Amino acid sequence: MQLKPRDLKEIIEDGKLVALTDFSSSSYFIYKGVPMGFEYELLSRFCDEIGVDLHMKPVADLDNIIDLLQEEEGDIIAANYTVTNQRRQEVAFTKPVLQTRQVLVQRMPDNWWNYNREQLDQQLIRNPVNLVGKDIHVRRHSAFYTRLLNLMDEVGGVINVKFAEGLGTEKLIEMVSKGQIEFTVADENVAVLNKTYYPNIDVRTPLSFAQNVAWACRPNSTALVDTLNNWLKSFKRTEAFAVIHMKYFKARTQHKQRVLSEYSSLSGTKISPFDNIIRAQSKRLNWDWKLLAAMIYQESKFMPNAQAWTGASGLMQLIPETAHRFGVDSNVFDPQQNIQAGVSFLEHLQDYWLDTLADTNRAIPFILASYNVGLGHVLDAQRLAEKHDGDPFNWDHVSTFLELKSQPQYYQDEVVRHGYCRGSEPVAYVRDILLLWEHYKNTPLAAKAERESILAHPAGHG
């Protein structure tokens, strides 16, 4: 752990905010190669405001999320996190991001569509008193468990709470829908959203009054909390906030299409329609295929017919000379030919940089920048870095001088051979690809064999 607490100043100096989150349809997921989620989009706006990159760090077991925050594995918890007095003893909450309440999630009877509202109410639990003796699955350290303990005192009976180890709220809702468990508890905003995916669940029985959902920081991150609060106070009044909220919690049909798509990290197994080609071609580079996928998305948004005013075409945006040189036989818009030629060009660049930088991870930013802006401009930036006592083999140093190549005193320097360069573009290009690669690495695309059984055991009622 750092000797000095990590607060806003350290985050800005580091250039990134790390958010501890969960993969869910409300917080954070990937759809068609693009990071999405209500909390992701809000935090992205905040990070733009303070001038840092946003790094999302999914947490497999949310029961450990406060420990990870305190260990400085992240700077903020953004996971539809309910404000409770117990949690206030360990974290500092921001102003509310939204308000919701806890509801019971239960499965409707077979042929439920043949029932009217009154008949359904007779079949379902509408009075929390009737939960006495029932099994309800929730996470051990969730606000739902705390609420069930209080509810037991209120109704004067024991509810059989079973702990759902390592399973998130949306997975438990799915298990209710499939009849694998009988009940769970969820925040109403998440429950209503999930009813769009699982129409056979009922979420109309409230178990609490309205509660605040907020972001959580370490208590000593006072500057970060103050800045977040000021930003939230202002941003929540904007049309942009209303649009983001509507996108995830009101426009449910469109959101359902995203979440249930084969290109969603929540339910699908693909990043793009070209994953098989990308996987095969990435082996030629000895790259993680998700890095090549991130680069292709950055180049063309996975649109095989993409064309730029520069004459670049196809998925990897090849100019005619490069396409011909590296093997496009007939059709630059053909995904196989385009990716194969683009990877051949990357191989050529990688061979050059690995002669200088033996470590592939160190070489990748140089390779990407060279692909984007040309090898010559990157070499110019290296020479400038060396002249100004920087490390010509450290991308952080080289990228600084690549950006400075837009200024006359640098692009007219005697060590510069390729003149003016709008260097901010290749620097942003590299940064955006590496950030997107990080998002893709977060996604559980390689293994969708989820646990269909739950390791649970009864909890005491306190």
Image (cartoon, rainbow, N blue to C red):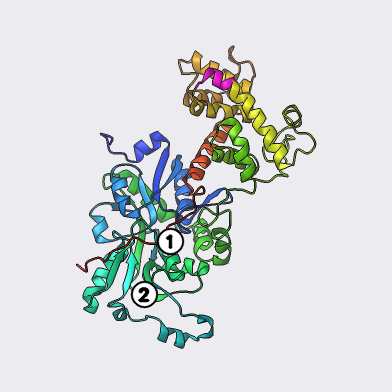
Percent x, y of residue 208 = 32, 72
Quadrant in the rendering for residue 308? top right
- Left or right: 394 with respect to 413? left
- Left or right: 209 with respect to 450? left
Tag 2 secondary structure:
strand
Percent x, y of residue 258 = 57, 58
Q: Residues within 10 Å of mark 2 (few under 14, many from 20)?
A: some
Q: Amino acid at mark 2?
A: Pro
- Towards the viewer: 164 or 389: 164
Percent x, y of residue 125 = 37, 80
Tag 1 secondary structure:
loop
The residue at which mark 2 appears reads as 206
- The span shown in magenta is 352-358
Given this view, does label 1 or label 2 mark the residue nearer the observer?
1
From where the camera sits, is residue 283 visible?
Answer: yes
The residue at the point 44 percent across, 64 percent down is 190
Percent x, y of residue 437 = 52, 40
- Up-down relation of residue 246 to residue 317 (above or below): below
- Towards the viewer: 217 or 279: 279
- Left or right: 353 with respect to 218? right
Q: Amino acid at mark 1?
A: Glu
Q: Are marks 1 and 2 in contact (CB under 8 Å)?
A: no
Q: Residues within 10 Å of mark 1 (few under 14, many from 20)?
A: few
The residue at which mark 1 appears reads as 452
- Left or right: 309 with respect to 111? right
Q: Main secondary structure of the magenta part?
A: helix
- Towards the viewer: 94 or 28: 28
In primary-sequence order, the first of circles 1 and 2 is: 2
* Cα separation between marks 1 and 2: 27 Å
